[in-house]
Image (spheres, rainbow, N blue to C red):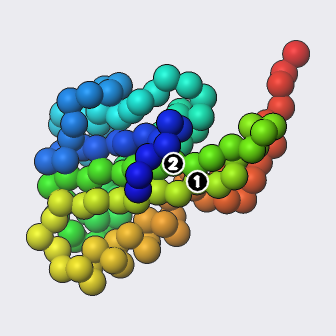
Amino acid sequence: LVLSPFGVRAPSGSLRDEVGVELPHAWTREGVVAGPAANGAQLFHLSVAFCVLNDTYREAERLGIDVAGVAVEADGGFDADWNSTGVEYAVTVDSVATPDELAHLAAVVDEVAEVPRVVRAGTSVVRRT
């Protein structure tokens, strides 16, 4: 993806960057450095990217696929009223797995990743008083 001003990158392991917000991560000792995270639009996209990253590690372990690193880029736009016009993400996996194994992993993650599922289904947000 070519990232817009709302786009983010969440890399880990062998693909980890050194610029961004450092986040602890259960699947990697050194954590994830993700960003940018300077506004709500970027944080929204970062929630998708971080979830996909996390679930890529989880599902790779479940499928017996060794993963050295994962990087997820997420981006999207907003209309004039700041309604999301959709989110796109791309995943890079550093692994010796075959292309077919990685394609299967990506399909499984796309199906089970919780935050993308919530966004796809829609949800209400209510202010409490």
Q: Residues within 10 Å of mark 2 (few under 14, many from 20)?
A: many
Q: Is residue 57 above or below residue 21?
A: below
* Residue hosting label 2: 75
Q: Position of residue 127 (x, y in %)?
A: 83, 25
The disc labelled 2 sits on which kind of residue?
Asp
Which residue is rendered at x = 41% and y = 30% of the image? 36
Q: CA distance from mark 2 to mark 1?
A: 6 Å
Report if the CB atoms under discs 2 and 1 are less than 8 Å apart. yes
Q: Position of residue 38 (x, y in %)?
A: 49, 23
Q: Earlier in the sequence, mark 2 or mark 1?
A: 2
Residue nearer the viewer, 72 or 67: 72
Q: Position of residue 109 (x, y in %)?
A: 43, 65
Which residue is rendered at x = 26% and y = 28% of the image? 19
Q: Is residue 93 left or right of residue 79?
A: left
The mark total stands at 2
Q: Which numbered circle lies on residue 87?
A: 1
The disc labelled 1 sits on which kind of residue?
Val
Of helix, strand and loop, which one carries label 1?
strand
Any part of residue 55 in sight: no
Q: Residue furthest top?
A: 129
Q: Is residue 37 above or below residue 73?
A: above
